[in-house]
Image (cartoon, rainbow, N blue to C red):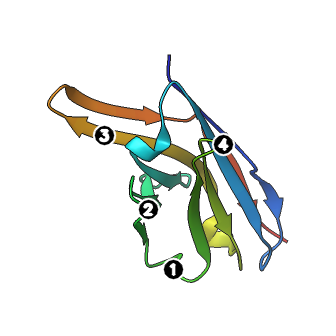
């Protein structure tokens, strides 16, 4: 059984920082394209940052220079370091692991963690 468990969300003031963690069981993250998505009330879920199996990263324009995605293969954990947070960053953040091969498509999601940026 595959499980992705996020942690690290919370309430932070504008300009502050948070680090989100996503730990997997049942899969090896380095074999997947892993991403952090977010969904704000009334908005569609959007990709915030992604990291491929070989470590290439990509970011939404809105978070470039402020957020950093990384992976600790020994811990089988993916992180999202968020700095200079803005109220617009308020959302539920979800971890995703995706892979496709001849055997099928594998698409796993965590339960989400709330990030609220407010004074």
The CA distance from mark 2 to mark 1 is 17 Å
Dot 1: what SS? loop
The CA distance from mark 1 to mark 3 is 25 Å
In the rendered structure, find residue 64 and report the number of the disc placed on it.
Answer: 1
Dot 4: what SS? loop
The CA distance from mark 2 to mark 3 is 15 Å
Badge nearest the viewer, 2 or 3? 2
Of the pair 8 and 90, the residue shown nearer to us? 8
Where does the C terminus fall, quadrant-wise?
Answer: bottom right
The CA distance from mark 4 to mark 3 is 20 Å
Q: Judge left or right: residue 114 versus residue 12.
A: left
* Pointers 4 and 1 in contact (C-beta within 8 Å): no
Dot 3: what SS? strand
Whether 90 is drawn above or below 16: the answer is above
**Which residue appears at 59% of the width and 41% of the height?**
76
Which residue has dot 3 on it?
A: 99
In the rendered structure, find residue 116 and report the number of the disc placed on it.
Answer: none
The CA distance from mark 2 to mark 4 is 15 Å
Q: Earlier in the sequence, mark 1 or mark 3?
A: 1
Badge nearest the viewer, 4 or 1? 4
* Pointers 2 and 4 in contact (C-beta within 8 Å): no
Which residue has dot 2 on it?
A: 55
Q: Earlier in the sequence, mark 4 or mark 3?
A: 4
Which residue has dot 4 on it?
A: 75
């Amino acid at each position: 059984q595959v499980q992705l468990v996020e942690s690290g969300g919370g309430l932070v003031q504008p300009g502050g920082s948070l680090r989100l963690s996503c730990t997997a069981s049942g899969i090896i993250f380095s074999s997947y394209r892993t991403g952090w998505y977010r969904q704000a009330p009334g908005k569609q879920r959007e990709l915030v940052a992604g990291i491929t199996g070989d470590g290439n990263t990509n970011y939404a324009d809105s978070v470039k220079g402020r957020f950093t995605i990384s992976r600790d293969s020994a811990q089988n954990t993916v992180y999202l370091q968020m700095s200079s947070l803005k109220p617009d960053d308020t959302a539920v953040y979800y971890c995703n692991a995706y892979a496709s091969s001849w055997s099928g498509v594998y698409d796993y999601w965590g339960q989400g963690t709330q990030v609220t940026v407010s004074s």
